[in-house]
Amino acid sequence: MYMKLNYTHKSPGMMWLLLLPVIAGIVSGSVWASSGGASTASPLIHQYFAPQLCGNTLLEVFRNTLVTTSVFAAAAFFAGLSVFGQPVGALMLIYRGFGIGASAAALYIASGFHGIPAALLLLLPKALAAAVTGILSVRECMRFSGRIAEFSCGSDEPVRDTVALKLYCNRFLVLVTFAIIIAAADTLLNYLFAGLL
């Protein structure tokens, strides 16, 4: 079974639907970190959302934020090239949310109420931007994966491989551009509010 998603028309309802796995990930990440789960110091867990772990220099902050957002987009891109892209995309959003939740919980555990300004100014903007670009990446992944699945099941409608693939690539190039902007903005926020950590 796969979700049949229209590749050419916008579906705002789908954006809200894709927010659910992100929320599930945030809740599970928060519970896991606050209940004494394994160390959140691993980049595989915090995904560089935790401001105290995103880098010691501005260059490291830029690099780490860019890597985590662009690698996510690249993973969604390649997942969309297979018939299994839809479930993989949903799992990716849960993972993204898990990193946000675990990072927020780790910041609160380390700093208590004193960590609230850092969470609001350093963690929340990056988390929101990464969640939105993650949802957009997975939406494109699911749409293209659905087209591939439909074609492989013998659909009479031609896929128009070249046009569809070119459009798919262009959309992910835009998402990578967004990743660069997010990294630059996060670096600026860390420069302006470094004293909060």
Image (cartoon, rainbow, N blue to C red):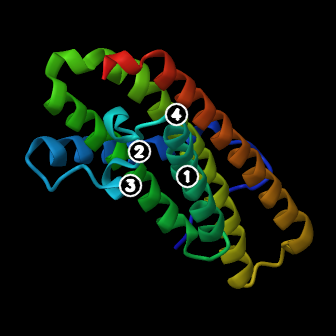
Mark 1 in CB contact with mark 2 (< 8 angstroms): yes
Residue 58: mark in rendering: 4
- Residue 52 in the image: state x and y as whole percent: 32, 34
- Could you tell me if the residues under marks 1 and 4 are in contact, i.e. CB atoms within 8 Å? no
Q: What x and y, as percent, mark residue 1?
A: 52, 73
In the rendered structure, are the residues bearing label 2 and label 3 in contact, judged by CB atoms less than 8 Å apart? no
- Foreground of the two, 25 or 73: 73
Residue receiving disc 2: 48
Nearer the viewer's eye, disc 3 or disc 1?
Answer: 1
Q: CA distance from mark 1 to mark 2?
A: 9 Å
The amino acid on which the numbered mark 3 sits, given as a three-letter code, is Tyr
Camera-side residue of 17 and 110? 110
Q: Position of residue 167 (x, y in %)?
A: 84, 57
- At label 4, the amino acid type is Leu
Lower position in the chain sequence, tag 1 or tag 2? 2
Residue at the spot 59% in from the left edge and 61% down from the top edge: 76
Residue indicated by mark 1: 67
Q: Residue at x 75, y 56 (%)?
A: 7
Which numbered disc, 4 or 3, marks the residue that appears first in the sequence?
Answer: 4
The numbered dot on residue 95 is 3
What secondary structure is found at the residue carrying circle 4? helix
Q: Which numbered disc, 1 or 4, marks the residue that appears first in the sequence?
A: 4
